[in-house]
Image (tube, grey):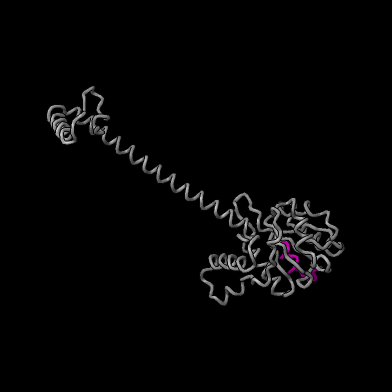
Amino acid sequence: MSDHGDSLNDGLDYNYNSSDDQIESLVHNQETSSSDPEGQVEDYNHSKNHETHNVGKKRKCKSDKLSQKKRQKMLLDMEQKRNLAKEVPSVIAEKLAAKIRQRFPDLSPLELGELYIGKSAIVDTQSFVLERNLDNYKNYIQTQLKRVLQDKGYILVVSISAIRACDIFRAVKCLPIGSLKLISKNKLQDDLKVLKESKARLLIGTPGRISRILETENTPLTFKMIDAIICDSSFLDSKLQNIWDYDESFALVRKVLSMNEKCKVYLY
C-alpha cells in the first residue's frame, strides 16, 4: 500500500497501483491551488512547520550522535588513564612521551628529549594484579618496593591534589617506615622542620610542594636522598584528569631523575 493512503485520513480505499496514486495526488494539488487559496496558505504553513520539525529532529539526532561520540571518547580516555600503570615500561614511556609532544608541539626533538621519562627509569609493576585503589596502597608498597624499603632513602608519593595526598597518607600511615604529608596547607617552614626532625621515609605530597622543598636553600631533602617516586597515576579527579595532565608532575619527576640516576619511577 502506498504511503499516501496512510497520510490521508479520508476513508477511501487506496488499494491501487502507484501510478494511480500519483495522478490522484496531482489532481488534488491542482484543485487545491486553483480553488482554495486559504487552503493553499494553510498547506504552505503546515509544510513549513513540517520542514522546521524535520530540521529540528535532524539537529537533535546529530547532537545525540555527537554526545554519544564524546561520551565514548571520554570513557576510552578514562580507561586508558586508569590502566596506564599496568603497562610495561616501554609502553608507559611512549604514552607519556606522546603527551609531552602533544603539549609542546613547537619544541624540537632535542628539547622534547629533555622532558621525556625514559623506559629504563620506570619499574615494571604488572605483577601487582590487585585494583590500584587506596585500600591496596600499603600492599603495593610492601610488595613492589621491597628493595627500596631496605635502603635508607626516601620514597616520594606524588599526588594530583592535597586532598588526595591526605587520603593516601591515611591509607599508608601504619607502614613501619613512617610517612609525612607535604601539602600547601602546611607552612613551608613547618614542612622543612618536620622533615629535618622526623625519621619517616615515605613522603606524600603534591608536585608543587615537593618541588618547593627540594629547591629551598639548605633543604633537609635533596635529590640524591630520593630512591623512588610513586606516581599516583590511576586516580582521576572530578575533571577526569590524572597526575600526567599537569606539567608540574612531569617537571618534578624529570628533575629528580636528572639529578639522581639511581632513582626509579613506579606508577600506581
**Residue displayed at 64% across by 70% down:** 117
**Residue displayed at 13% across by 27% down:** 35
Left or right: 103 in relation to 31: right
How many numbered circles does the render carry?
A: 0
Q: Quadrant of residue 147?
A: bottom right
- In the image, is residue 218 part of the stretch drawn in magenta? yes
**Residue displayed at 51% across by 71% down:** 106
**Residue displayed at 57% across by 75% down:** 111
Picture coordinates of residue 250 (x, y %)? 64, 66
Between 198 and 188, which is closer to the camera in this rendering? 198
The N terminus sits in image quarter:
top left
Picture coordinates of residue 137 (x, y %)? 75, 55
Relative to residue 169, is residue 248 depicted above or below? below
Picture coordinates of residue 205 (x, y %)? 73, 59
Left or right: 101 in relation to 4: right
Q: Quadrant of residue 126?
A: bottom right
| Main SS class of the magenta portion in the image | helix
Picture coordinates of residue 7 (x, y %)? 27, 30
**In the displayed image of the protein, which residue is found farthest to the bottom?**
110
**Span highlighted in magenta in the image:** 209-219
- The reply to whether residue 176 is in sight is yes
- The reply to whether residue 207 is in sight is no
Between 191 and 31, which is closer to the camera in this rendering? 31
**In the displayed image of the protein, which residue is found farthest to the top?**
11
The C terminus sits in image quarter:
bottom right
- In the image, is residue 170 part of the stretch drawn in magenta? no
